[in-house]
Image: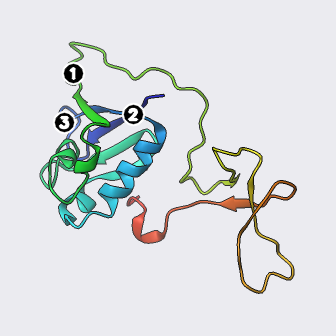
Amino acid sequence: MVFYAYVKYVTDNSGYRYVITFASREVADEWWRAVSTSTVTSFVTSVQRVNAQFYTHNVGVANAADSLTTTGVATQFLGKVFFTWLNDLGGRGLSIIPPLEHFADHISGNSFFIRSKVAPYDYWYYPTSSNTTNAVYVSRTERTRFTVSLTAALQAPS
């Protein structure tokens, strides 16, 4: 199922606003990982993730839409992602993304049970006692709640 997000120009309220259409939620996560860890530092600096469906960019540094055509950023997503330029602040058109089914924001600081998409009865399990190797196991009878969050270096500035 396609997944949508907005991206807004961080220093201006009237232009360079887009709807990003991803082939799936997974593609959105992979695109963000590619952009945020790119060797092209202007994109790492410019594009920031506010939440799963909202990004900002400073087009004076790098335009998020160019991530698909700039070598070293996210060119591998050219056939899986596209940017649609939104109407301007004057309101000459109303462009909204459609409502999505319930989804979890995987980078939220919340905790989740992690399971296999292929075998949905297989969960990650981390035994708290007698786990001298600090290993994570797959289990059909036990499961552990994991907390997923960004490291301080990757968080958007407040």
Q: Are marks 2 and 3 in contact (CB under 8 Å)?
A: no
Return the disc, 2 or 3, that comes first in the chain's sequence.
3
Q: Which mark is residue 87?
A: 1
Q: Quadrant of residue 73?
A: bottom left
Task: Inspect the image, locate mark 2, and give the three-letter code of the amino acid beneath it.
Answer: Ala
What amino acid is found at the position of numbered circle 3 in the picture?
Tyr
What quarter of the picture does the C terminus occupy? bottom left
Mark 2 Cα within 10 Å, few/some/many (few <14, many 20+)? some
Q: Which residue is mark 2?
A: 23
| Position of residue 67 measured from the top left corner of the image (x, y, whole percent) | 21, 49
Would residue 149 be found to the left or right of residue 72 on screen?
Answer: right
Which residue appears at 47% of the width and 39% of the height?
A: 25
Closer to us: 71 or 48: 71
> Which residue is denoted by mark 3 in the rendering?
16
Residue 56 coordinates in the image, percent (x, y): 30, 46
Residue 55 placement, left or right of 141: left
For image coordinates 59% across by 36% down, the residue present is 103
Residue at the (33%, 53%) spot, across then down: 48
